[in-house]
Amino acid sequence: DTGVSQNPRHKITKRGQNVTFRCDPISEHNRLYWYRQTLGQGPEFLTYFQNEAQLEKSRLLSDRFSAERPKGSFSTLEIQRTEQGDSAMYLCASSWGLRLRETQYFGPGTRLLVL
Amino acid sequence: AQSVTQLGSHVSVSEGALVLLRCNYSSSVPPYLFWYVQYPNQGLQLLLKYTTGATLVKGINGFEAEFKKSETSFHLTKPSAHMSDAAEYFCALQTGANNLFFGTGTRLTVIP
């Protein structure tokens, strides 16, 4: 069990560019979550998958954001036409279970800086 | 609606002293409560969690927390601080939904 991994760890981009992040959950975990953490704040929920189905999206997830988990394993989070306000740490977490509220295990995050 | 309030964005303690990090919550349903620790430029590591049952929960690295329903609190303690405890600590709440609601965090500084 190697834990949740995220790539890249850091990304610097110019405003208006598109970026894509990848998350590999713990093997066999059926649930995957994306959170965003801005400086000095706690993580905020963005979206959640159970297997390949995206079951919940926060209002924070604007139309410029899209997340996928095509085979129920890894997930990608894409931000189109990045804005400076998108600068943040993007955290991925995964959990296993059939009930609600299973413990989530977090990856190291991808830190995005939009210039 | 649910929310988490962490009192004190910064806490400083001397090495060997008691660590007390405060967390209060608001929830319309019985909550699951968590403490996570975050070291610089790293993700979140689970310290401990409360779901149901025993209200005193023991976690890793000598930390523990007590769920007090009457006070809507879930404070984190450690009897003796170590230099390696310096980090940011987040209290989080999970209700009927799957996502976590986090507090704004408390940065712990340990003074040698």
Image (cartoon, grey):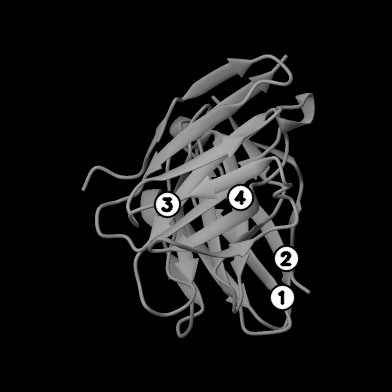
Q: Secondary structure at mark 3?
A: loop
Query: Alpha carbon of mark 2 to alpha carbon of mark 4: how far?
Result: 12 Å
User: For mark 2, what is the residue?
Assistant: B24
Chain letter, disc 2 residue: B
Q: State if disc 1 and disc 2 touch (CB < 8 Å).
A: yes
Q: Amino acid at mark 1?
A: Thr
First in sequence, mark 4 or 1: give its number.
Answer: 1
Mark drawn on residue B72:
1
Query: Alpha carbon of mark 1 to alpha carbon of mark 3: how far?
Result: 37 Å
Q: Nearer the viewer, residue B78 or A22?
A: A22
Q: Is residue A69 visible?
A: yes
Query: Alpha carbon of mark 4 to alpha carbon of mark 1: how far?
Result: 16 Å
Q: Are marks 3 and 4 on the same chain?
A: no
User: For mark 3, what is the residue?
Assistant: A69
Relative vertical location of residue B73 with respect to residue A39 in this rendering, above or below: below
Relative vertical location of residue B3 with respect to residue A37 in this rendering, above or below: below
Q: Are marks 2 and 3 on the same chain?
A: no
Relative vertical location of residue A7 with respect to residue B30 in this rendering, above or below: above
- Where's the N terminus of chain B, which quadrant? bottom right
Q: In which quadrant of the rendered view does residue A71 lie?
A: bottom left
Query: Alpha carbon of mark 2 to alpha carbon of mark 3: how far?
Result: 35 Å
